[in-house]
Amino acid sequence: MFRPVLAEPPPRSVKFSVTIVSAMVLSVLVALIPTPALCASLLKPKREGHSQLRGPFGWFNKGFDWTSKRYTGGVGRRIGGSAWSMPAFVIVAGMMVFFFAKLPTHFLNRHGCYSGQS
């Protein structure tokens, strides 16, 4: 991509290089300034007695917590006591290997039309 642009007359190649450099500078600034501050504010532990959020953000947090608890509970039950989890996983993995082996290697014949046969 860079070679054809460098072969262009100077106005185009200069515009392209200015665009690339400005995008890189903006990316570096975003990575260095707001990202660490946002991560610090999100990962900060909640203070005791701190009121919960209300409105859409509170609803989102409640829904996210409910979903997380259900997911981790389900995974724990699957790992902890279920005798059918590993055989089911092996069966599904075997089916994937079987169907991948049956997958046609090409979908177009030599004339460029779909043939439906491999």
Image (cartoon, grey):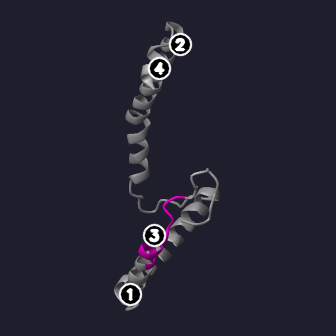
Q: Is residue 63 visible?
A: yes
Q: Answer above or below: position of 69 versus 21.
A: below
Cα separation between marks 2 and 3: 47 Å
What residue did someone put label 3 on? 100
* Percent position of residue 11, x then y: 53, 8
Stretch of the chain drawn in magenta: 95-106
For mark 4, what is the residue? 4
Q: Earlier in the sequence, mark 4 or mark 2?
A: 4
What residue type is disc 3 on?
Phe
Q: Nearer the viewer, mark 4 or mark 2?
A: 4
Q: Say whether residue 34 is magenta.
A: no
Q: Amino acid at mark 1?
A: Pro
Q: Main secondary structure of the magenta part?
A: helix
Amino acid type, mark 2:
Arg
Residue, disc 2? 12
What kind of residue is marked 4?
Pro
